[in-house]
Image (cartoon, rainbow, N blue to C red):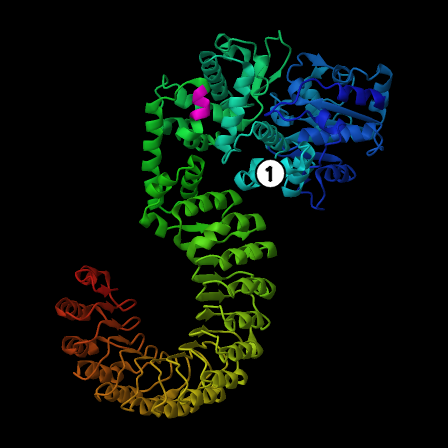
Amino acid sequence: MDKEAVLTDIWKSKGTPTFLGGELPASVINSDKYIPALSTDARGNSLDRAIRTALCDEMRRVALIGPEGSGKSTALQKLVVDWAKEAHLQNFSHVFHFEFRELNSLEGALTLKTLIQHNHHRVTPESIPLVIEKPEDVLFVFDGLDQYQHSLDPSIHTLCSDPSRAASVSCLVASLLHGSLLRGAAFVVATRPTESLTFFSGTQVEVLGFLKPQREAYFNSFFTDPADARKARLHMERTLGFYDFCASPRFCWTVCSIYKYLIDSGANLPETVSQLLVDVLVHLIQTLSLNQAQSRALVLALCRMASHCFFDEHSICAKEHIDFCLLQQPLTAVNALLQVFGDVESVARTFSFHSQLMQEFILAVAFFLDKSTGEGVERMLKRHEGKAKFLDFFLSGLSEPTQRRPLENLLGIFDSDQIKDYKCWFKSSSKETLRGFHRGKRYRCFHLLHQAQNESLVREIMTPSARLSMGHEDLSLQDCAALNYVVTCLGELERLSLNRTHFTEEMAEVLAPTVSLSQQILLSQTSFSTRAVSRLASALSRGVVGELHLSNLDLLDENLKILCTALKDSKLQKLNLQVCELTGACCESLDSVLTSETSQLHMLEIKYNDIGDLGFTTLCNAMRSPHCRLQDLAVPKCSLTAASMGACAEALSSGHSKLRKLKLENNYIGDSGMEALCKALQHPLCRLQSLWLFCCDLTAVSCSHLKEALLSDGCFLLELDLSLNELGQEGGLLLCQGLSRPGCALEKLNLTRCELTLAVFKELGSLLKNGTCQLKSLIVGLNKVGDHGVKHLWDAVAHPSCLLEKLDVEMTKLTDACVEDVCAAIRASKTLKKLEMRNNSLTDASVPALNQVMKNSHNMQELVLRYNDFSEDVFDILEESNKITY
């Protein structure tokens, strides 16, 4: 096969580059401006290398799948050029390149020889036998499978294996692709996503197009002035880089072309994709030198064509569907918008839009130009639902006068009724959407606000109630841009919740202003690249963020270190690091924040991180610094033991510690650790007020230490949680002795499932009645003392000296026998507000009395009766009181 002839044919490719059609592949390759697109090849290769690698596999059948303009056609031509230049694929003696859109026009029965020679005129008849004899040396390259108008389903064809047999073109192609004809030949097929791929077996390579590095190289090659290249690229990344179509080399060509025109003319660059297409359409119409009436007629004619293309299976429009008289000039004058298939005089000549974006934009423009169809915006969007992706974007952009004015200067004033119809629809649908919880619709609303570029409209739509309910999950880069626009228009955000999202550097960069403007940020089940953490940290350092909640994510020590560098100078007061895969090494980073003179951090939670004793000791040493402002420290289930409690006690007694609340749940503190803590509680410089020791392996021995602490005048504890520790009767009685001190300030006590006995409940009852006890909340659930044991508490609640506001006796084996005492206690108490009686054995018989006493009580706010032995017969009675939860 004459490789020089192949190159000659490629370099003579017809057509000229256009804004929306892109630069011709041959022109790109011949001028050495070719930049390989990216692919999802498992080996991480560029698209070119991925194709060559797949062709070396045993199957040697490759399908390139990607959206319009993603670089598939150019990659195929580069493949052929490299073969013809003997740079690659020299194991093939013949390479045949076909375009499916040209195969559409071939009719009648052809042989394989005729098909090849029809598309490759320089192939001599003598070389065809070589193709047939050694098919393993042949590569077929097919471009545009999605544009083929005939089915390749093998079930509807009688596949042929004889190269000399004449058959329809679709039968020949199907026979080639399915291996019955020229078995052993290699294939590369390029296509947009299409159902026809179900009939193709082989390696599938997704074409990603251009990401940031490729775009940078492309802009640098397009602009002769490096300053213009940088300006254009940075502007595109800021305003458009979050859209998927920015990965399209063809779209990059369009952007560069229009940016160069705008930069050269000194005009402003567009802020949205709507504004970009306004600039593109204005420029194209101006090049046609039409008057206003002709321009308007052209756009309306193109609109009818665009609408027809949307509902055609192959997105094409046949000649008979176009009203040419409205165009006032040959269609070749608008080749920047259209691509034409077939000969000029052919009845089968068809047309389609180079870009679906422009196709949708034309529909939006025509909607505002002409209301003769009588179609409202809601009906129009419904009719194009599932087909037009950005139609509502363009309607939103064009509804604003500043954005549509350049088009109105060329086409005439847009219809005011259509504009009003759109705005009424948008405002009403937005308010309904923002009241709901449909994430997709909510973000669509944000995207439309972004396209409109109207700050006052954002404030009108985003009412205070709409802002409060803003929760965000699984964000895309495009979502981040829309959200950021909305928040920056509002000027501030009380609460920003971002969950289940993988944050790249680009996403963190786009959201940086939003982060800086948010007072509270919640990030749950998210992940970050290291560069994303750096962006987030920078935004936090210069923002107003007061609370940062990071939970259930793989933050890791190294990323926390980056974050802490910024937190020193931030306004952050509360930091939650729950389940962040941290170790003791992270505490050195936290130490640098806590001991910084500029840090304002006063609440730190590191729940469920394996920091261990060494890490906790580091935090305790930080609390001894005069600069440390920490008041609330939560380290539940952090692999702590008694070994680090000495350092904690020293910090609490240092005179510098400002700690008021310490949560140590689910650690192995043990009795020796408790002894160290209790010594600190007795120290006159210790100001700890709340101590949580839920499930800390404590016994009655710990209660002897607690007793000494509570009896001390230096103890300021207001809240104590000892739940899920086996204190037993001995421990419970010792604790009661400590609480009996007249000056004991304890107000909240939790003794859930502490193996307490009737004797302990009796002492607690006496304590509550002694006139000096300050307890306002007592939780003694899961201590199974029954009616006799809890009766001491009912008697105490009824006593005038009892100050209890909350009492929890869940799962204490209560029966209907206690109800009389319960009701008496509720009637007599002047303070009780909430009573928890879940998971007991109350029956229907107790309901009337409990219902009546709750109706009559002025103090009681809630009685919880869930999971008792009630039947449905009493549900109506229970519902009579809105203060009973059952």
The structure residue drawn at horizontal position 29% and vertical position 91%, both measured from the top left corner, is 741
- Quarter of the C terminus within the rendering: bottom left
In the depicted structure, whether residue 157 falls above or below residue 551: above
Task: Classify residue 790 by image quadrant.
Answer: bottom left
In depth, the one of 145 and 629 nearer the eye is 629
The structure residue drawn at horizontal position 49% and vertical position 68%, both measured from the top left corner, is 598
In depth, the one of 457 and 376 nearer the eye is 457
In depth, the one of 741 and 289 nearer the eye is 289
In depth, the one of 155 and 265 nearer the eye is 265
Amino acid type indicated by mark 1: Lys
In the rendered image, residue 406 lying in the magenta stretch gets the answer yes
The residue stretch that appears in magenta: 405-409
Q: Where does label 1 land, which residue?
A: 231
Residue 681: x and y, percent? 41, 87
Count the numbered circles shown. 1
Residue 149: x and y, percent? 60, 21
